[in-house]
Amino acid sequence: MIDQFLLGAEQIFTVSTLLFMLLGSIAGIVAAAIPGFTITMAIILTLPLTFAMPPLQGIAVMLSVYVGGYTGGLISAALLGIPGTPSSVATTFDAFPMARAGQPGRALSLGVWASFFGTLISTVVLIVAAPPLALIAVKLGPWEYFSLILFALTIIASLVGASLLRGLMAGAIGLAISTVGPDPMMGRPRFDFGLDMLAPGMPFLVVLIGIFAISQLVSEVEDVRAVRSGTSLATKDIDFQTWAMMREILVRPVNLVRSSIVGVLIGALPGAGGSIANLLAYDQAKRASKTPEKFGTGISEGVVASEAGNSATAGGGLIPLIALGIPGSAVDAILMASLMVHGISVGPRLIMDNADLVYGMFIAMVVASLMMLIVCMVSLRLFLRVTEIPKWAIVPAVIVCCVVGSFALNNRVTDLYLLGFIGLAGYLLKTLDYPLAPLVLGVILGPIAETNLRRALMTDSDWTVFLTRPVSLLLLVAAVASVAWAVWRHRQSRARKSLTDPKESG
């Protein structure tokens, strides 16, 4: 084992491999910072460049893009209020208000350190607990998966903002959007109303960019004075206090470790991914907080939880890939394809037949996280300059990036029409004080829930199976408890506000 570990380390710690990994880290950060350019797109663009490399070197470069991408989404989420990737949705909830309050440097530093520690924790779990966690994940049937997604959907109840009814309605809108287009099992068209634009469905990336990016940009240009004079983000805080931010995270390790473990567990479940982990980690931090009402106002715990959660899925997603040959996400599937191109069989024998490669991947994860940290800390001042660019310049540039990212997904002009329509709809919902996070969550989880429900009923039409399978029953009970807890907390919050504000109680 020691010999194989040293052999893997020898292949990683070469000048050429480290240089390529550094370039990959920079590429991942920059790509993810641009709204619309997802981590998957960055990995796909990297794949052809690794064919001529040795297997471990190529995988190490792609892992660098992978790790850097999970952090890059933080930049636009904090500075522009637009998640660079789907896995940065919850990051906008507190990082953007913190930047708005004149602390953009603090928001970025907290997020970068949380991503770094989240990746390290997930790598440790990957090394120590890969086999048992992978076995648990692969044994889940469609009954357990549906119950899991139903439990995840209960997060909507805790992301509703001031109005429980508006939040639930936003979640229902998201679920309705996910049903447009071909059904996931038989491919039959539905709810397209005879329109060619809706026939392929509403791509999640287009919905995400429209709901968050376009609606945010429309809100920004409403402030004519800010458009003429420059961005309204305060830039007083140009001191990042890098080490102070690290200490701030480490003196409260519970939030960091809990969020990272959530990310690892979600990442180990095939098909879940960073977008769910990001929201779920944020939700758990909010539930555990003594001051949940401060979440969404620029609180550090929210930034740490969301970034640690999504970054930890990088290590978690590799668990089923390495142990069983099952990719946990689209990015992991690309990594698996890269191994197969080099003639390496991916499956339970991967660790036994290619131990040096697996240990090299473990080392590459640690090195990639260190490179990400160094690149971000060196370049944060450049990223902070985004806040000083006048809005008349930055708004058109971001719109162009959003349009290019939406078009590049499927090369369909009709997606651009959808982008504009969804953006205006998101702006309208925002002005009516409807929370957007539940809508996005419904779009993400809707297809997964539907697919697994139909698979379960096709396997056995008896719906009581959901209650007789122990794991499924446990998850359903947890879903009911989650809703009950969220409703109780919401009523308690309204009761406290009524006591402090007599007008509201009337």
Image (cartoon, grey):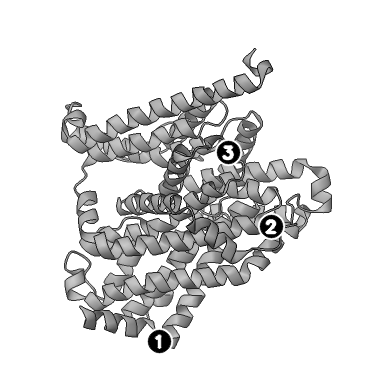
Mark 1–mark 2 distance (CA, rounded to whole Å): 39 Å
The span from disc 3 to disc 2 (Cα, nearest Å) is 33 Å
> Which kind of residue does numbered mark 2 sit on?
Ala
Q: Position of residue 426 (x, y in %)?
A: 60, 36
Going from the N terminus, do you reach mark 3 or mark 2 first? Answer: 3
* The label number, if any, that marks residue 14 in the structure image: 1
Q: Which residue is mark 3?
A: 294
Which residue is denoted by mark 2 in the rendering?
Answer: 397
Upstream in sequence: badge 1 or badge 2: 1
Q: Residue 75, relative to residue 218: is it above or below?
A: below
Q: Nearer the viewer, residue 16 or 331?
A: 16
Q: Nearer the viewer, mark 1 or mark 2?
A: 1
For disc 3, the neighbor class at 10 Å (few under 14, some 14 to 19, many from 20) is: some
Residue at 23%, 55% in the rendered image: 134
Image quarter of residue 390: bottom right
* Image position of 42 (left or right of 229): left
Question: Badge 1 local density, few (<14 within 10 Å), some, or many (20+)?
Answer: few
Would residue 194 be visible to someone looking at this image? Answer: no
Q: Amino acid at mark 1?
A: Thr
